[in-house]
Image (cartoon, helix red, strand yellow):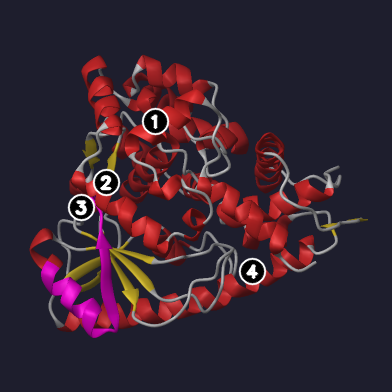
């Protein structure tokens, strides 16, 4: 069934917020349990659904799973995105092969992370899962040499964060919306695996790094280690309202490959951050982990975080959450002192945070509209506390979806 669609201007932010929530929750249900009935969405909601699919990295999956056609242009958008994803991934796999050969010849172990590590497991078919970049992990002592290798392969370091160094191709473009096969090559080089939750770094490098790594490309030491990384990364996304549905899908698919021994290995690490993303994935995909695992990981989790996450849905903690928050993720603090420290750092950000923001103002297309990128931290906090303010990134994606040709 097809639904008529017309071009519409951007409606008020409240309308945008409702549309993002409505379409996000429906598309999340469709991935877990496809329905035959076409959503009864307005023309604007159909465009918002494109923004949601793009932000959450699920366009390729939806193209092969939906049982309905939808509004004019909807199906065509998904199919085109799947084709771009397939072509992009082919480029990334070829580049990863080159990286592996170069690192092996230089005697340096390197590890492909997250999405690139899921490829060999056969969890996805061609064109289903997007890869915006390659995440690579090296030992601390190899970081400088690894950066030199990436430079020799035609990349340049564009900036650094607390988590990684970012290398990008010197030439190429980045599509303003969704996936594109010709986006410039990008690598995030890690020397540790960590997430600020909400400010203190939770580091699991010792779990992810293989003890007997050999020169060239190495896998995760176990499925439990891969799951631990996926859960920690998803936890960071929940805390800062940047979670993507594709991350929950990764967790659900990998969970079905986990053995009792894998789950026991994960439990032995007492991961206090594991229950929120596991519980959220289970909310959409049903039972994905043994009850004993859910009970133990819940017990490791702080009471405030348990209570907060128990009522959160994907649209509350993801890129679909439109509203800015003064202290996002404060529920992840493990003590009152840590919560106060996090709040203080939000009011007076570190030099590293300010540097990241300056880089974002130069490169993030969502900050090209409005004054948010130019505001001081104090004015940001006041605005977030005084009135509802839309986050630039989801609003940018909605605008881009509205601007697409019919």
**Tags 3 and 4 touching, CB below 8 Å:** no
Judged from the image, the secondary structure of the residue bearing numbered disc 1 is helix
Left/right placement of residue 139 relative to residue 371 reads left
Q: Write down the residue under mark 3.
A: 192
Disc 3 to disc 1, how far (Cα)?
31 Å
Residue 159 magenta = yes
Residue 283 seen in the current view = yes
Label placed on residue 82: 4
Left/right placement of residue 180 relative to residue 165 reads right
Label whose residue precedes the other's in the sequence (1 or 4): 4
Q: Write down the residue under mark 1.
A: 381
**Segment tinted magenta in the rendering:** 144-162
Disc 1 to disc 2, how far (Cα)?
15 Å
Label whose residue precedes the other's in the sequence (4 or 2): 4
- Image vertical order of residue 390 relative to residue 51, above or below: above
Q: Quadrant of the N terminus?
A: bottom right
The residue under the point 33% across, 51% down is 357
Judged from the image, the secondary structure of the residue bearing numbered disc 3 is loop
Query: Few, some or many C-alpha atoms within 10 Å of disc 1 (few <14, some 14-19, many ≥20)?
Result: some
Q: Residue 148 or 44: which is nearer the viewer?
A: 44
- Image vertical order of residue 244 relative to residue 307, above or below: below
Disc 1 to disc 4, how far (Cα)?
39 Å
Judged from the image, the secondary structure of the residue bearing numbered disc 4 is helix
**Tags 1 and 4 touching, CB below 8 Å:** no
Label placed on residue 353: 2
Judged from the image, the secondary structure of the residue bearing numbered disc 2 is helix
Q: Which of marks 3 and 1 is in front?
A: 1
> Could you say which quadrant of the image residue 177 lies in?
bottom right
Disc 4 to disc 2, how far (Cα)?
35 Å
> Could you say which quadrant of the image residue 81 lies in?
bottom right
Task: Residue 371: give x, y in percent of width and height.
Answer: 47, 47
């Amino acid at each position: 069934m097809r639904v008529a669609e017309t071009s519409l201007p951007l409606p008020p932010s409240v309308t945008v917020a409702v549309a993002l929530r409505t379409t996000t929750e429906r598309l999340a249900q469709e991935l877990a349990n496809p329905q035959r009935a076409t959503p009864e969405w307005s023309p604007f909601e159909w465009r918002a659904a494109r923004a949601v699919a793009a932000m959450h990295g699920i366009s390729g999956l939806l193209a092969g799973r939906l049982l309905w056609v939808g509004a004019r242009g909807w199906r065509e958008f998904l199919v085109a995105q799947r084709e771009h994803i397939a072509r992009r991934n082919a480029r990334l796999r070829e580049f990863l092969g080159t990286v592996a050969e170069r690192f092996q010849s230089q005697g340096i172990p390197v590890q492909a992370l997250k999405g690139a590590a899921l490829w060999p497991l056969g969890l996805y078919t061609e064109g289903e899962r997007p890869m915006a970049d390659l995440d690579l992990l090296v030992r601390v002592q190899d970081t400088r040499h690894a950066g030199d290798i990436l430079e020799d392969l035609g990349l340049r370091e564009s900036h650094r964060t607390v988590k990684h160094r970012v290398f990008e191709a010197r030439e190429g473009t980045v599509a303003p919306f969704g996936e594109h096969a010709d986006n410039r090559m990008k690598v995030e080089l890690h020397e540790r695996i960590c997430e600020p939750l909400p400010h203190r770094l939770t580091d699991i490098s010792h779990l992810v790094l293989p003890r007997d790594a050999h020169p060239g490309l190495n896998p995760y030491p176990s499925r439990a280690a891969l799951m631990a990384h996926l859960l920690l990364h998803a936890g960071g996304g929940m805390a800062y309202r940047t979670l993507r549905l594709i991350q929950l899908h990764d967790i659900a698919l990998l969970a079905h490959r986990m053995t009792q021994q894998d789950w026991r290995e994960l439990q032995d690490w007492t991961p206090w951050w594991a229950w929120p993303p596991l519980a959220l994935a289970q909310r959409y995909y049903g039972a994905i982990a043994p009850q004993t695992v859910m009970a133990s990981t819940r017990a490791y989790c702080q009471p405030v975080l348990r209570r907060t996450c128990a009522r959160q849905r994907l649209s509350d903690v993801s890129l679909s959450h439109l509203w800015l928050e003064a202290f996002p993720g404060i529920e992840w603090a493990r003590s009152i002192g840590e919560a106060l420290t996090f709040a203080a750092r939000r009011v007076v950000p570190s030099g590293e945070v300010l540097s990241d923001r300056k880089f974002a103002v130069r490169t993030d297309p969502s900050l090209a509209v409005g004054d948010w990128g130019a505001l001081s931290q104090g004015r940001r906090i006041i605005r977030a506390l005084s009135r509802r303010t839309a986050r630039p990134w989801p609003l940018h994606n909605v605008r881009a979806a509205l601007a697409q040709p019919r």
